[in-house]
Amino acid sequence: MTDRLRLAGVFFDVPADLEERAVNFWSDALGADAERSEIRNPYTLLKRPGQEIGLEVQRLGDGMPRIHIDFEVDDVDAEADRLEGLGATKVSRIETWWVMKDPAGIVFCLVPK
């Protein structure tokens, strides 16, 4: 069977006014170095030696705090269509990836490998 979804990262999505507190909390809680991305603003990578899965704090404009997961796939559009057929909902297409919700409303993203 093809490896369709590969877990790529876990994101702590936070409102802009709570970003600094969230970054400080999660970096201290995890014993991780916080590296703000100059290229991928509004993300702060939480890095630990040997960590394979990306953990990041993502600043949202306005919105409820949440956690979402990114999955890497070979063909973003084909996989979005397949998952939609299984009951997921396409929320929005952003650049090269899809934001989706599972049948329970949990947010996840499909990103290209």
Image (cartoon, grey):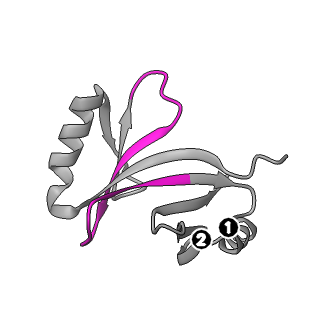
Q: Mark 2 points at which residue?
A: 88
Residue 107: x percent and y percent?
46, 64
Q: Residue at x 66, y 73 (%)?
A: 84
Q: Which residue is drawn at 44% across and 47% down?
A: 10
Q: In which quarter of the image is residue 59?
A: bottom left
| Helix, strand or loop under label 1 | helix
Q: Residues within 10 Å of mark 1 (few under 14, many from 20)?
A: some
- Pick whichever of labels 2 and 1 is earlier in the sequence: 1
Dot 2 and dot 1 residues touching (CB under 8 Å) = yes
Q: In the visual, does 91 lie left or right of 14?
A: right
Disc number placed over residue 83 in the picture, else none: 1
Which span of residues is magenta-colored?
Answer: 48-70
Residue 1: x percent and y percent?
85, 46
Q: In which quarter of the image is residue 90?
A: bottom right
Amino acid bearing label 2: Ala
Q: Is residue 14 magenta?
A: no
**Label 2, label 1: how many angstroms apart (C-alpha)?**
5 Å
Q: Is residue 12 above or below residue 60?
A: above
Q: In the visual, does 103 lie left or right of 26?
A: right
| Helix, strand or loop under label 2 | loop
